[in-house]
Each structure stands twice: as structure tokens, then as C-alpha cells.
Image (cartoon, rainbow, N blue to C red):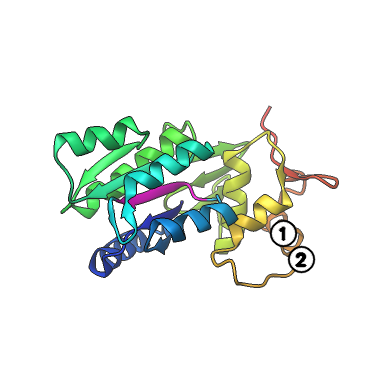
Amino acid sequence: MYVLCIEDDENIKKIIKDSLAHEKIDVEFTDSIEESIYKLEIKRVYDVIILDRILPDGDGINFLQYMNRKKINIPCLIISILGDIDHRMEGLQLGAYDYLPKPFDTRELIMKLKNIVKIKYNLTTNIIRIDDVCLNIFSRNVYVGDKRVKLTPQEFKILKLLMVNKNRIIGKSEILERLIENEEKSIESNLVDVLIYRLRKKLGKKDFIQNVKRVGYVINDI
């Protein structure tokens, strides 16, 4: 899971960072609406957005309205001290998936994030299974049959992306976006091809990930 958290309170950011790290959930932080819009314009690869309402440059509701105008379909979980029924209804009516008043229990935050991802990907469990390959999206464990396969974080991201989007060709540019956690980080142009090669070798299934020439990669489950 890849989360964008829009929050300017350093104490709350640390709490969220620590609790998500414990669950092996990747999170990137922004402090303002303006910075968050910039992130979406260059990336748009997040599974969920955690959104505070009281931000230095305005109400987080304005960010929701921006997403609606741009038709950006990334589920948002609002966390805010503005937690009365009127504020919660306002956020939900504008398209937030859920609303968690502050202060909150991190266990509830994690559960809400997991439920949102299940709904987003139409999952009934944490497990994605194609053929004899089994992937747990939260524990990040991968098995081929009864054998556990150890993957690097980048390899896992690619495999999850392809398995969640089974039967859909994923372009190299989209895969690269998933791999880059900082837009200033330079990467090798052949990184995707190298990682796919390693994945095939580790899985021991040469044809599990198929190459569509000049387009991208796909895992078929038909």
C-alpha cells in the first residue's frame, strides 16, 4: 500500500509514520494543499490519501474539491479535529471514503486504510492468488505453492501492481512511477526490465509475467 498523508502537525505525522511502518505500509508526507496538488500532478500513484482539514493554506475540503474537478479517483480518508456530525457529513458528501475524528486510535486508522484498499481493489481478503502464486498485500509475503519467495520492496511493488491489475497491460512509465518515492531521485532507464527479469527468476515462472512488446507487462488470469 502506498499512502499520501497531508498533515502539517509534526507529532501526528510521527505517530502515523511509526504506525504505518509497523504494518509495512509506505507513506509520503506533504504539509499543504499546494504541495499535495503538485505531488498528484507528477505522480498519481497513491492507493489512499490521508487528509487533514486544518492546513496552512486552507481547509482540506478544498483539496477534495480539486480532486473532484480533476476527476482524480484516489480514495481519501479525512482525519481532523473538526469531528462533529456536520463536518463529517460535509467531507463524506464531497467524496471522502471515510472520516476519522482526532484524537484517534492508530489501530482504527490502520483498519480503515486496509478496508479502503480492499474496496478499491474489490478484494474480500488480503490475499491475491493467481495460478499458484499467492501475495498478501499487507504482510508482503509471497508464495509460489508452499515455497515462500523473498522479494525486494521494488520487486514486490511491481508484482502487486501486476497482480491487482490482472489481465490489464501496465506500461513501463506507470511501473516506474510506482517505484519512485521521490521525484528528484534518478533511476536507470532499464530498471523495470531488470526487475521483471529478477521477478521471473525468483518466481521460477518464466511466462507468468508476459511482455507486450513496446507497450508493457501483464499477468493474465483467464
Among all residues in the image, which is located at the extreme top? 222
For the image, the number of numbered tags is 2
Q: Is residue 150 left or right of residue 83?
A: right
| Disc 1 residue crowd, few under 14, some 14–19, many 20+, Cα 10 Å | many
Residue 132 among magenta residues: no
163 horizontally vs 18: left or right: right
Q: Is residue 127 above or below residue 17?
A: above
Q: Label 1 is placed on what type of residue? A: Val
Residue with the mark numbered 2: 189
* Residue bearing mark 1: 192
Residue range highlighted in magenta: 46-52
Which residue is located at x 60 percent, y 41 percent? 163
**Residue at the spot x=42%, y=50% of the render?**
138
Q: Is residue 104 above or below residue 98?
A: below
Residue 165 appears left or right of 122: right
Q: Please, what is the three-letter code of the amino acid marked with disc 2?
A: Ser
- Residue 148, percent from left and from top: 54, 54
Front residue of 218 and 17: 17
Residue 175 is at least partly visible in this image: yes
Task: Examine the image and state in which quarter residue 16 appears.
Answer: bottom left
Tell me if residue 47 is in the magenta stretch. Answer: yes
- 102 lies left or right of 199: left
